[in-house]
Amino acid sequence: MSVQSPIRVGIIGLSAGGGWAPVSHLPYLQSSSDYTITAVCNTSIESGKKAIEKFQLKSAEAYDSVESVCDSDNVDLIVCVVVVFAHYNLIKPAIERGKDVYVEWPLCATTEESRELAELAQSKGVQTIISLQSRAGHVHSTLQQVLASGRIGRVLASHIVGSGGSPETGNKIDRKFLYFKDREAKGARGQVALSIYVGQTMEFVASLLGQPRTVSAQLQVTWPHVDIVDGDNVVERNVEKTADDYASLHGMLGEDVNYSYIFRGGDAFEKGNGLVWDIIGDKGQIRITGATIMFNMGADNYKIQVKDYETGEIETIPLHEKLPLPLMAQNVGMVYKKYAEGAQVPSFEDAVRRHEFLDAMFASNKENGSMRALKYSF
């Protein structure tokens, strides 16, 4: 990696009013000697200064355009933590100026834009990071080790079912996420909310068991009307929602592994019980349970068990060590840690594959669940 230590970070979209960046990105960046935040880019200098003051970023300067941040010699890594519709226009100038980039998932509003940025980054020799961060976490590395041990033999099938576990996927939507209610939103391909949730968890599955080769999809709207909320206050009731919040998928992964995947919006039936995932082998089986199907968000109660078919014994596997950070920051922190160490991190190429999978999923649903074959660009 060609950047100095500490790595100098410019954040696009850090708000004094809160949001995702303060709870997921800042905890590691502010606690690690490998990083220093040198720039905050918002829609105005004033907004940037407020964020710098609020989060005590003494080494940071405020900017109001991505071009000015990228032209600075004091920034090595651009981190983009804004809504997906703005990603393409914000990240392309950074890549063109040779800056490494870390972008929230989804990468762009369309697969074509995402593929363009991935190809541009390759041509510029820029390292890219996409926030499919569950792949960097301790649950993922634990499962990798169990699978590699051969304890369950050849993997035959994967069956995962779970709930989103957040109000935005159920019968309430925070007004900050109004676009989650729309089937079509600002020119985005597919549906933003479902792309976020299915894309995140299918990346976790695919990175362990192999890329999906086929997909058949049936999607539906469970809650056609929702309440719009601001915190605990309902600001509008019974608002029409056209975006799907349920997905039933099946097909083949990697080397002839059958998969089924069922995602439903809203809370689990019982708190803390929002995931059951069985990975079935010819010698044994792995069962993963926890509060949510969203491994990117994480849960404090994930549990991995392995059953040996021959003996009938079931063993609970100790999870690998996690970072001593708040839950939302643990996986994101591991991505930053791996990047600083020069280790492999989720890239724009990975993001393009997920976008291409989602395109096939949405196309299959329009064709009443027809089986679609996948062909990936990378």
Image: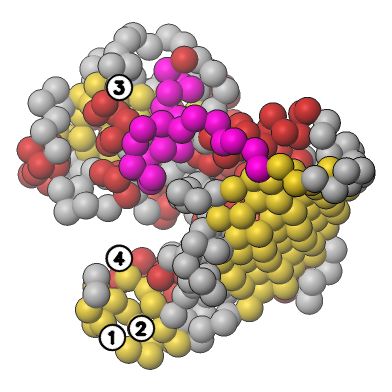
- The answer, for residue 193, to whether it is visible in the render is no
Query: Which amino acid is tagged 4?
Result: Lys
The mark nearer the N terminus, 1 or 4, is 4
Q: Earlier in the sequence, mark 3 or mark 2?
A: 3
Looking at marks 4 and 2 on the same chain, the residue that comes earlier in the sequence is marked by 4
Q: Give the answer, above or below, for where 364 lies relative to 93.
A: below
Residue at 38% x, 87% y is 239
* Left or right: residue 40 compared with residue 155: left
The numbered disc on residue 32 is 3
For the residues labelled 1 and 4, the Cα–Cα distance comes to 13 Å
- Magenta segment includes 331: yes
Q: Which residue is mark 4?
A: 176
The residue nearer to you, when weighing 12 against 67, is: 12
Q: Which numbered disc covers residue 227?
A: 2
Identify the secondary structure beneath mark 3.
Answer: loop
Give percent across and percent down for residue 331: 46, 38
In which quadrant will I find the C terminus?
top right
| 16 or 285, nearer to the observer | 285
Is there a contact, CB below 8 Å, between mark 4 and mark 2?
Answer: no
The picture places residue 332, in percent across and down from the top left corner, at 42, 37
At x 24% / y 28%, what residue is drawn?
30
Q: Earlier in the sequence, mark 1 or mark 3?
A: 3
Q: Is residue 35 above or below residue 89?
A: above
Q: Are circles 2 and 1 on residues that touch, CB within 8 Å? A: yes
Side (left or right) of 82 relative to 69:
right
What segment is highlighted magenta in the picture? 316-340
